[in-house]
Image: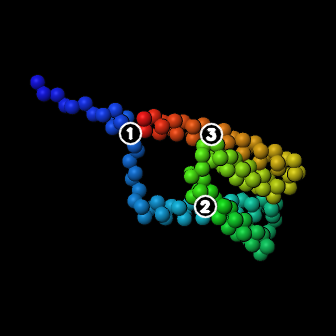
Amino acid sequence: MAHAAPAPRRMARQRRRPDILSARTHAALNVALPVALGLIYGFWAAANRRFGGPITGWNLLFGFVTALVFAVVFAALWRVSPRLGRIPHAVVWFVFAGCAAGFLASQSNLSVLSSAGVGLVTGVGVLLINVYRFFTREDRAALDRA
């Protein structure tokens, strides 16, 4: 009776998700995602700042500058942070998320302590999620390499 030769263990354990997007689509998403998130964030910050009043030129300028800064920082972190280790990677996103949430809270006339608290709580949540995610993914990747 003929049997199939057993596959090496390394080959048997590798289960990769298929990449269904082309390189061109990935390149477009690397630009579109920061721009879209930046515009949403800038609109949100400008809306918080005007307190339901009329939209003015300064309010529009504030929204677009906020969107630009958010998009540039997000794009830089999106590109650089995967090269860091697990903990620095999670800490970078903790700081970014905490600062972003704290800034939005500060635009809605909350006190400095309340804004810092919102930023800290948001940042800690992002930190815990990312530490869990990075530790479970890297441990799995280490097992696949062994």
Q: Which residue is mark 3?
A: 131
Tell which of 122 and 48 is nearer to you: 122
Q: Mark 3 or mark 2, which has the lower sequence index?
A: 2
Specify the label residue 75 is tagged with: 2
Q: Amino acid at mark 2?
A: Ala
Q: CA distance from mark 3 to mark 2?
A: 21 Å
Name the quadrant containing residue 126. Answer: top right
Residue 46 position within the rendered picture, expressed as x and y whole percent measured from the top left: 75, 64
Q: Where, by quadrant of the figure, is residue 90 drawn?
A: top right
Asked which quadrant contains residue 53, the reply is bottom right
Is residue 50 visible in the rendered image? The answer is yes
- Can residue 39 be seen in this snapshot? no
Above or below 132: residue 47: below
Q: Is residue 6 above or below residue 57?
A: above
Looking at this view, name the residue that lies furthest to the left.
1
- The residue to which callout 1 is attached is 15
Q: Residue at x 86, y 55 (%)?
A: 109
Residue 102 screen position, x and y as percent: 78, 52
Image check: 139 left or right of 114?
left
Whether residue 88 is situated above or below residue 49 in the rendered picture: above
How far is the residue under mark 3 from the one under mark 1?
23 Å
Circles 3 and 1: CB distance less than 8 Å?
Answer: no
- Please give left or right for residue 106 compared with residue 76 in the image: right
The 10 Å Cα crowd at callout 2, few under 14, some 14 to 19, many 20 or more, is some
Q: Amino acid at mark 1?
A: Arg
The residue under the point 38% across, 39% down is 15
